[in-house]
Image (spheres, helix red, strand yellow):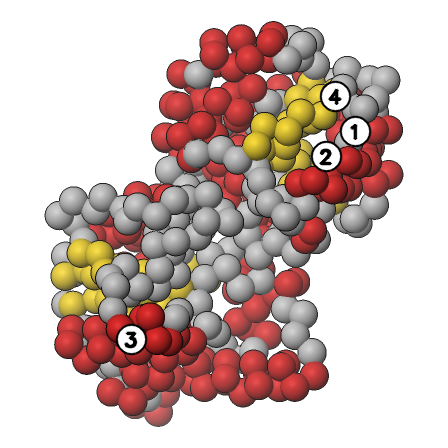
Amino acid sequence: MKVLLLNNVPAPYFNPLFERLGRESGWALTVCYVTARKNDIGWGEQPPDSGAAYRTIILDGEPSRLKDFLGRPAATVRLLGVLARERPDYLISYGYWLPPQAAAISWAVATGRPFAVIGDANYYNDHATGVRRAVKGMWLKQVIRHAAALITVGTASRMFWEAYGARPDKLFESRYVVDNDFFARAAEERREEAAELRARWGLEEAVVFLYVGRLVRRKGIDLLLRAASRLADENVAVIVAGDGEERRALEELAQGGRQVIFAGRLEPGELPLYYAMADALVLPARDEPWGLVVNEAMASGLAVIAHRHCGAAIDLVGPDNGVALETFSVAELVEAMRLIAADGGRRWAMRRRSREKIRDWSVAEAARGIIRAVEGSSRPRLSQTVASELGKLE
C-alpha cells in the first residue's frame, strides 16, 4: 500500500517515529514536508536522514519560478502535483487547517482516497471565536465526515475531536512521543559534564529548574522569572534554554537575579546536557497544545511543573512526578517550585516516577498506533444496518 504522510517541517523528534513506521508497516511510505525551514525553532534546514525506511519530499526544497512568484503558497500547488503523480492509496495529514493540509484533505475527498488526520489539537486551546469559529466548525464537520480515521495523541486531543462530533469508531490513538531511550542514555552519559557546568556556574548545591523552548509570550517564561525572584533567598536556580522575540524583555525582567541563567538557543544534541544538569522542568505556557519537552524531561529523569491544560501535562504530570498548575499565578508557581526544592527525598521520588511513567509513551507503541489506524480504516466498512443483520445471524 502506498501511504503519503504530510507534515509541516522535519522536526527531529518525528524522525524515529517515521523510521519505525517505514520499517514495520510494510507500506511504501513517503513523508512529504511543506518546508525544511523553521528557523525560529532552531531545527536548521537539513532534511532527515531516512535511510531506506521511507522516502522524503520537501515541497519548497527546490528552486522554481513558481516558488519565486507565489512564495510559500507554491508549496500547496506543488503538493497537489505530488498527489496527482504519486496517487497514494492512503493519506495521513498532520493537521487540518493550514492551506497544504486543507488542500491534501480536499484532494483525498475528491478522489475517494481514505485519509487520516493526526496532530496536537487540544480541547483546552480551542479559542476560535466569531466568524473564524463558524468557518472552523463547518470545515471540521466535513473533515470528520469524510475522514477514515482521526488519530488522537492524548486525552485533550480526543476531547477536541469528540467536541466536534467525532464518533468513537473513527477515533484511534497514537500517543505523542520522543525517543525515550536516546534521552535517558544521553542524559546519563553527560552527568559528569553537567556537574562541571553546574560548578562553573556556581550551582553545585542548588535545585535547578529548567525551561526549554522558544522565548515567546505564550510560553509564560515571565511567570517563571517572577517566581524565581521571590525564591531569591532560597537555594534555587533557573536556567532558560532557548531564544526568541521576548529574550531582551525577559533578560531585563531577570536583571540582577544571580539565580537566573540564559543559556541561549541550543542545538538538539545539546539538550541532554541541560536535562542532566536540572532537577525539574518548568513549562508555565498559557497555550500549549502538547509540549514534547515534557516527554524529553521525563525520559531524562526530571520532575515536571506545567499547567494542567498543557496537552502533555493532562496525561503525564501529577503529584507523583511533579505539579500540574491550576492557574497562571506567580504565587502558585512559587509554591510548586518550593514543594519540589524543599524535600530532596520527594524530589528524587518524583524524578524516578517520571522515568517510569514515560516508558509506556514509546516510539514503538506510537508507530503501532498509526499502523492500527490505517489498517483498521482502509478496509471498506459495513453499514450499521448490515452489521446489525450479520450480528443476528451469528
Nearer to us: label 3 or label 1: 3
x, y percentage for residue 343?
Answer: 74, 18
Tag 1 residue:
255
* Three-letter residue code for mark 3: Leu
Q: Could you give the CA–CA distance between mark 4 and mark 1, rounded to whole angstroms?
A: 10 Å
Which residue is at the front of the view, 261 or 29?
Answer: 261
Q: Secondary structure at mark 1?
A: loop
Q: Could you give the CA–CA distance between mark 2 and mark 4, rounded to whole angstroms?
A: 12 Å
**Residue 259 marker:** 4
Q: Could you give the CA–CA distance between mark 2 and mark 1, rounded to whole angstroms?
A: 6 Å
Mark 3–mark 2 CB contact (< 8 Å) = no
x, y percentage for residue 165?
Answer: 54, 80
Q: Could you give the CA–CA distance between mark 3 and mark 2, rounded to whole angstroms?
A: 42 Å
Q: Secondary structure at mark 2?
A: helix
* Three-letter residue code for mark 2: Glu
First along the sequence among labels 4 and 3: 3
Judge from the rendering whether residue 306 lies leftward or rightward of residue 269; answer left or right: right
First along the sequence among labels 3 and 2: 3
Tag 2 residue:
251
Tag 3 residue:
66
